[in-house]
Image (cartoon, grey):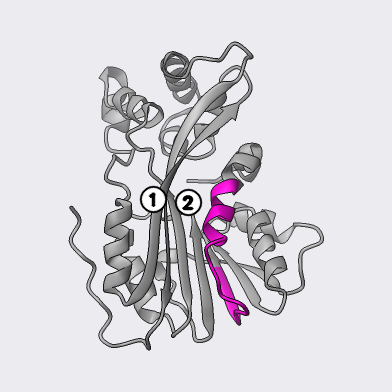
């Protein structure tokens, strides 16, 4: 699937708030090396570079379009670089003090094993912080899945979308990180985003959750699916008297710091509940 950086950035104010709520919990005073895994178009990674000007800050993304967009940013700090790589194959190199992953791991089946491996490789005093959407049971996703699994669409889309087990609960993430030897804080927040426009929820998911559907269909079929889906969304998310639409969005956060030296072997991932 190809990412559209401009479409993803259409709701940048709303999408950036969880990032700062997450990274605000990281208390490392002077990291040597900081990684932003799944950095996207790079603006938020640049904020990390400005926060820690003496650190080497590296943004990593598997989308060539996103990395190209990030590398084209103007007025980026001199301590910031971007690289094209798959987070599934990444391991914290020596000197890594902060690892951030913002709204990426929901795309990675079995990412709990990745988290356990990353956490197990951290040096003493290093931080791991991640955030994933927890809205897979929200109408926006339930309606998308039910439409994809219905009549005309079932044969083409029945297995394309992730279900509500795409991410774990805050409790499960807390157990996972603590099992890997980290001192941990995990929580969830439901943001009440106020969106403008005629089909604002559709526009939001076009940049993220709807991408697998659009990638699997021809342009004409994708347009037909969008029209049917848009009608369902308008019923589920009616506009307010002032013309805005309230879009509740649950997100799950976890932050951990290694307070003891790394031990070997790496901890096993706890069983999913």
Identify which residue, 243 or 7, lies in the foreground: 243
SS type, badge 2: loop
Q: Where is residue 110 in the image (x, y as percent from the top left)?
A: 29, 58
Whether residue 110 is visible: no
Of the pair 35 and 108, the residue shown nearer to us: 35
Q: Give the range drawn in magenta.
A: 17-35
Verify whether residue 29 appears in magenta. Answer: yes
Q: Which residue is drawn at 25% across and 85% down?
A: 265
Report the side of 183 relative to 241 (left or right).
left
Q: Is there any visible trace of residue 69 in the rendered image?
A: yes
Please provide percent x and percent y for residue 85.
51, 66
According to the image, label 2 marks what residue? 103
| View extreme (right): residue | 75
Label 1: element kind: helix
Q: Position of residue 66 (x, y in %)?
A: 61, 53
**Is 20 positioned to the left or the right of 108 in the image?**
right
Q: Which residue is drawn at 34% across and 78% down?
A: 120
> Disc 1, disc 2: CB below 8 Å?
yes
How many numbered badges does the structure rendering display?
A: 2
The residue under the point 59% across, 41% down is 8
Seen from the viewer's position, the closer of residues 42 and 132 is 132
Q: Spot the residue most to the top.
A: 241
Q: Is residue 43 magenta?
A: no
Q: Which residue is drawn at 56% across and 15% down?
A: 240
The tag on residue 32 is none
Task: Calculate the distance from the C-alpha at mark 1 to the C-alpha at mark 2.
Answer: 7 Å
Q: Name the residue under label 1.
A: 106
- For label 1, count other residues whose C-alpha is less than 10 Å away and answer few (under 14), some (14-19) or many (20+): some
Quick check: 269 left or right of 117?
left
Figure check: 165 above or below 60:
above
């Amino acid at each position: 699937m190809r990412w559209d950086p401009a479409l993803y950035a259409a709701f940048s104010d709303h999408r950036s708030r969880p990032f700062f709520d997450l990274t605000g919990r990281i208390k490392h005073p002077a990291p040597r090396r900081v990684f932003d895994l799944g950095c996207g178009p790079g603006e938020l990674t640049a904020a990390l570079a400005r926060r820690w000007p003496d650190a080497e800050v590296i943004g990593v993304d598997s989308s060539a379009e996103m990395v190209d967009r990030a590398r084209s940013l103007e007025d980026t700090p001199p301590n910031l670089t971007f690289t094209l790589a798959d987070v599934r194959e990444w391991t914290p190199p020596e000197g890594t003090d902060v690892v951030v992953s913002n709204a990426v791991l929901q795309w990675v089946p079995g990412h709990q094993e990745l988290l356990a491996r990353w956490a197990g490789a951290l040096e003493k005093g290093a931080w791991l912080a991640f955030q994933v959407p927890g809205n897979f049971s929200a109408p926006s996703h339930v309606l998308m899945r039910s439409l994809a699994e219905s009549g005309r669409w079932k044969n083409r889309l029945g297995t394309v979308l992730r279900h509500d087990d795409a991410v774990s609960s805050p409790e499960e993430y807390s157990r996972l990180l603590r099992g890997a030897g980290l001192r941990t804080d995990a929580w969830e927040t439901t943001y009440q985003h106020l969106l403008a426009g005629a089909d604002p929820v559709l526009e939001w998911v076009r940049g993220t959750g709807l991408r697998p559907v659009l990638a699997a269909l021809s342009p004409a079929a994708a347009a037909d699916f969008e029209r049917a889906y848009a009608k369902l969304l308008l019923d589920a998310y009616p506009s307010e008297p002032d013309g805005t639409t309230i879009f509740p969005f649950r997100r799950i956060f976890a932050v951990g710091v290694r307070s003891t030296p790394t031990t070997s072997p790496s901890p096993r991932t706890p069983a999913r509940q």
